[in-house]
């Protein structure tokens, strides 16, 4: 079994809580931050190969500075038992509590295929979804949040509540196609969805944090782009999506909580609006979609912390020279204002060998010291 990566805290007075807290404010730190997302298949493969113990925490194994926990269920109908419509050896087609028909792979991790939706417009939203979206305590995993928060404290890691924001809450109930058409032809409907979901998220956070304590920050997943383009213009973002972002981020600000926003795809054109809404850090900076970590650092590094932007395709080449070159090109630059956390530009698939990822972490931490 591979040993855990040595904890560099032995040479530092900073904990993960302190380090990430400073990075999000672009204040001096001892080294860049470290965090990562993994495919479930990757952890299974590395465990089967003996690199990880069964059930071992990746945060502990790689000495990550952050720990996340996703405690909310935002499905419209919590009482709905998913209906299996069709199933074969590789996939299963189900209708869920949002009224969405989705096809999922059974043999590996993958984004589900959108097949059909009950919610397609304002009338079907008001009939099938909106009446069910109340701040029910059953939506909250109190115990899971409590345990994750405790584990993060024990590991001196920065603990972030994580979950979706309004864009990622809407498309599971109506799909990208109907949502984006709605933004163009019936923006008041989509604005109502944004308002409903942002109010629900804040209400649930108020309940959870009052009973179980506050996190160190919030992490919103909000995939607003695809290859080469965002899903909508900056003007449309400001008119429709930004009010929901302002509402949720204003809540965070009122409690002194920094905000990290994840967004896959090409979202650089939306960054002025996202900064207006109050984000502190952009993650994941997807290279293959057209995002450029060095350009973002040049243009926004004084106002925005950055996490990611390391091309995961280089990692799954498993070529140490290429991995080293990718890190040497970027880390010495982006660590300059103390606002960078090492992370791939997406998540680690099972093509990446354990030893390659271990080299990535160790070399990244070496280059990222101050």
Image (spheres, helix red, strand yellow):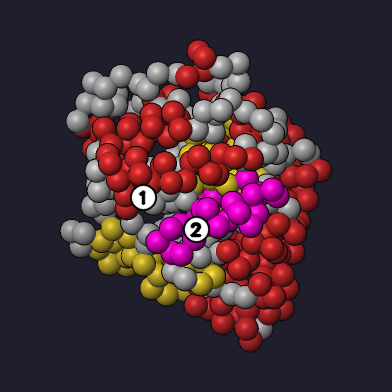
Q: Find residue 344 and report its horizontal and vertical position in percent.
A: 42, 46
Q: Find residue 331 and report its horizontal and vertical position in percent.
A: 48, 41
Front-lying residue, 300 or 118:
300
Q: Residue at x 53, y 78 (%)?
A: 178
Disc number placed over residue 20 in the picture, else none:
none
Q: Residue at x 40, y 70 (%)?
A: 114
10 Å neighbourhood of mark 2: few (<14), some, or many (≥20)? some
Callout 1: helix, strand or loop?
helix
Can the viewer see residue 116 in this picture? yes
Quarter of the picture containing the N terminus is top left
Q: Please report the bounds of the magenta region as a residue range.
A: 282-305
Q: What residue does disc 1 label? A: 312
Q: Find residue 361 and report its horizontal and vertical position in percent.
A: 39, 33
Mark 2 to mark 1: distance in Å? Answer: 13 Å
Is residue 98 magenta-colored? no
Q: What residue does disc 2 label? A: 292
Vertical position of residue 163 compared to residue 25: above or below: below
Front-lying residue, 310 or 216:
310
Q: Residue furthest top?
A: 10
Q: Point out the frontmost of discs 2 and 1.
A: 2
Quarter of the picture containing the C terminus is top right
**Can you tell which quarter of the image residue 85 is in?**
bottom left
Callout 2: helix, strand or loop?
loop
Is residue 73 left or right of 276 when viewed as pictured?
Answer: left
Q: Residue at x 56, y 77 (%)?
A: 180
Front-lying residue, 231 or 243:
231
Can the viewer see residue 21 in this picture? no
Q: Residue at x 62, y 75 (%)?
A: 233
Q: Find residue 359 and report its horizontal and vertical position in percent.
A: 32, 32
10 Å neighbourhood of mark 1: few (<14), some, or many (≥20)? many
């Amino acid at each position: 079994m591979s040993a855990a990566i040595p904890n560099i805290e032995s040479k530092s007075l900073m904990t993960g809580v302190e380090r990430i807290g400073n990075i999000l404010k672009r204040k001096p730190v001892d080294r860049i931050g470290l965090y990562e997302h993994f495919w479930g298949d990757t952890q299974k493969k590395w465990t089967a190969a003996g690199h990880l113990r069964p059930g071992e925490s990746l945060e502990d194994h790689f000495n990550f500075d952050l720990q996340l926990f996703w405690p909310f269920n935002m499905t419209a109908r919590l009482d709905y038992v998913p209906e299996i419509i069709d199933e074969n050896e590789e996939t299963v087609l189900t209708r869920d509590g949002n009224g969405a028909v989705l096809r999922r792979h059974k043999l590996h991790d993958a984004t589900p295929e959108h097949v059909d939706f009950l919610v397609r417009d304002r009338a079907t939203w008001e009939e099938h979804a909106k009446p069910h979206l109340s701040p029910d305590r059953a939506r909250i995993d109190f115990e899971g949040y409590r345990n994750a928060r405790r584990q993060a404290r024990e590991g001196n890691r920065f603990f972030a509540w994580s979950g979706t924001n309004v864009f990622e809450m809407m498309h599971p109930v109506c799909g990208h196609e109907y949502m984006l058409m709605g933004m163009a032809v019936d923006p008041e409907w989509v604005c109502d969805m944004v308002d409903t979901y942002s109010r629900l998220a804040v209400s649930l956070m108020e309940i959870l944090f009052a009973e179980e304590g506050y996190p160190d920050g919030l992490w919103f997943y909000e995939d607003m782009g695809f290859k080469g383009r965002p899903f909508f213009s900056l003007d449309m973002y400001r008119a429709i999506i930004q009010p929901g972002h302002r509402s949720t981020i204003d809540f965070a600000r009122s409690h002194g909580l920094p905000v990290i926003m994840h967004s896959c795809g090409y979202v650089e054109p939306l960054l002025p609006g996202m900064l207006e809404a109050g984000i502190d850090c952009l993650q994941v900076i997807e290279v293959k979609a057209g995002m450029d970590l060095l350009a973002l650092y040049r243009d926004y590094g004084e106002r925005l912390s950055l996490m990611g932007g390391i091309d995961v395709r280089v990692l799954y080449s498993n070529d140490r020279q290429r991995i080293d070159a990718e890190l040497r090109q970027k880390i010495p630059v982006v660590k300059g204002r103390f606002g960078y956390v090492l992370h791939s530009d997406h998540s680690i698939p099972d093509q990446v060998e354990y030893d390659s990822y271990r080299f990535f972490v160790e070399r990244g931490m070496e280059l990222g010291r101050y």
